[in-house]
Image (spheres, helix red, strand yellow):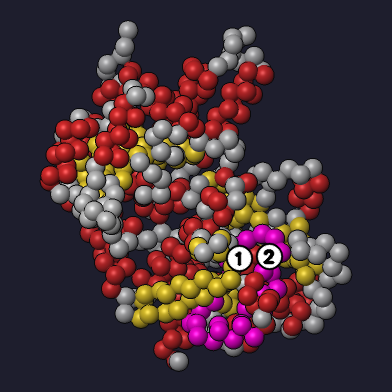
Amino acid sequence: MIRRASSGHKYIFVIGGVMSGVGKGVATASIGKLLDARGLKINLVKIDPYLNVDAGTMNPIEHGEVFVLDSGLETDQDMGNYERFLGRDLGADDYMTSGMVYASVIARERNLGYGGKCVETIPHVRDEVIERLKRAATVSNSDVSVIEVGGTVGDFQNALYLDAARVMHLLNPEDVMFVMVSYLPVPGTLGEMKTKPTQNAVRLLNSYGVQPDIIIARSAQALDRRRKEKLAISCNVHPDMITSAPDVRSIYDVPLNFERDKLSDILLEGLGLEGKQNPDLSVWKQFADNAHSGKNNIKIAIVGKYFDTGDFVLADAYISVIEALKFSAYANKATPELVWLNAKNYEKDPKAVEELKEYDGILVPGGFGETGIEGKIAAIKFARENKIPYFGLCYGMQLMIVEYARNVAGVEGAHTTEINPETKNPVVMILPEQVEKLAKKDYGGSMRLGAYPCDLVEGTIAREAYGKASISERHRHRYEVNPDYIEKLTKAGMVFSGVSPDRRLMEIAELSKKEHPFMLGTQFHPEFRARPLSPHPLFSAFIAAAVDKKKQA
């Protein structure tokens, strides 16, 4: 017999229609933000249909940034948006891939966990998905789970997850809602918004046994009443359940835009929930307004390698860095102009590095491999010698150490063993525990991952920025500053202002303000902890230094 009574916990599935890349992740994050503002406890879940066990082995050029959680799980960049919109950390149970799901099912089968049954996709793999969603809800102790199903309806890869959602709705219809984020094109030659692609997407979703309760209509323009009524009749959705989602200046305007169509009221009523009478979005609105009203325009050069593929710049590889810079700039009443500079250009033409004089700050983000490395080192040297505020993240700190060792500390041929394993002066080297893993080609999840503590040294830029003696930050790396060179580097003027509690690992390196206005690198990834309403202190210190440079120019 089908159970009709409410189970208490509520689930909202967010599904894509027509095409990918139209903001399904931002819509999911925005729904979470609105419900959180209504006083409900929310967990956001991302389902990636890939067979990768986690996102750590995915090429950032193809998939975008790898976002690391406190637990050390390497996840999709949408998890970063979720944390930024909610303003808090999410757990490992809030992310799943097909690789994770199948690995769990196969491991259980190998241990006779299915009692000798023939293990099949339906029901066993599907049921594993359902159990993972329920576990995520339990672990987070939330009222509502908002679940983004990766891909677009009709994709072979996500059919399993749509069936899991169908079954959950079948068993507890009062507890499950479906939201389709679909695209309505406006062909330039016609100048008219077309609803047919979305109509077809809804019919395709119906073929899976799922009917959307809400349609979020993405388009370049706002949806008019006539289009809403046309969609409603064709898609069996009430016009009031269709939310217009036109292009906006910032993704942080999206929750405010949704609320104009009373989306949180619709969701609460549909799930039979009660919340605060009106969502308190005043602080969020002030932040969104600041994103459009900064007066000080500062130019920040981001020197990296994942920027060009054909004629396109792939900023998604560094999305958390971009957002962290924006948050701190807005807090400083500034507007950041972020310019992508390909480090490989400085290898082809050493004089090209002179263009960095035009910038108020230079940032070298994380990365792997030798592509563009000497170009990055040239940019770091230029920043140091010309007193341009510099911020190095992970690899950006390691190369800052290499540059300083070569050109200031007098360590001839200093290098990182990642690039030159035979270097006579390995100032940056692989973590001892990584050697065996790499020898076995065990790359997945093999780095130093997740949150680790760090002690800060009194009287340093880092200590002043954080305003406390001990911190915790997220890591994703294999290589560290070689302890054999610490004394030599320190005598030459390098300050290691952040260290692991056992004093074995150098977490933050900087030059004193007497030597440079802001020259600082972190072994960890501070961008993963930056939030719209609580910018990261190191990014804020970097932006403040850039603003000062702009004023002095």
Mark 1 and mark 2: Cα distance apart in space: 7 Å
Task: Relative to 31, say whether 171 is above or below.
Answer: above
User: Label 1: which residue?
Assistant: 305
In the rendered view of the protein, which quadrant contains the N terminus?
top left
The secondary element bearing badge 1 is classed as loop
Q: Earlier in the sequence, mark 1 or mark 2?
A: 1
Q: Residue sitting at 32 percent across and 35 percent down?
A: 201
Q: Amino acid at mark 2?
A: Thr
Do the residues bearing badges 1 and 2 touch, measured as CB atoms within 8 Å?
yes
Where is residue 548, by image quadrant?
bottom left
Residue 520: x %, y % from top left = 59, 74
Is residue 189 left or right of 16 when viewed as pictured?
A: left
Residue 385: x %, y % from top left = 63, 87
Residue 374 colored in magenta in the image = yes
Q: Residue sitting at 55 percent across and 73 percent down?
A: 341
Q: Residue sitting at 62 percent across and 72 percent down?
A: 343
Task: Relative to 320, say whether 549 is above or below.
Answer: below
The secondary element bearing badge 2 is classed as loop
Residue 538: x %, y % from top left = 50, 69
User: Label 2: which residue?
Assistant: 371
Mark 1 Cα shell of 10 Å, populated few (<14), some (14-19), many (≥20): many
Is residue 310 left or right of 288 when viewed as pictured?
A: right
The magenta-colored residue range is 351-379
Residue 181: x %, y % from top left = 32, 42
Near-viewer residue (158 or 198): 198
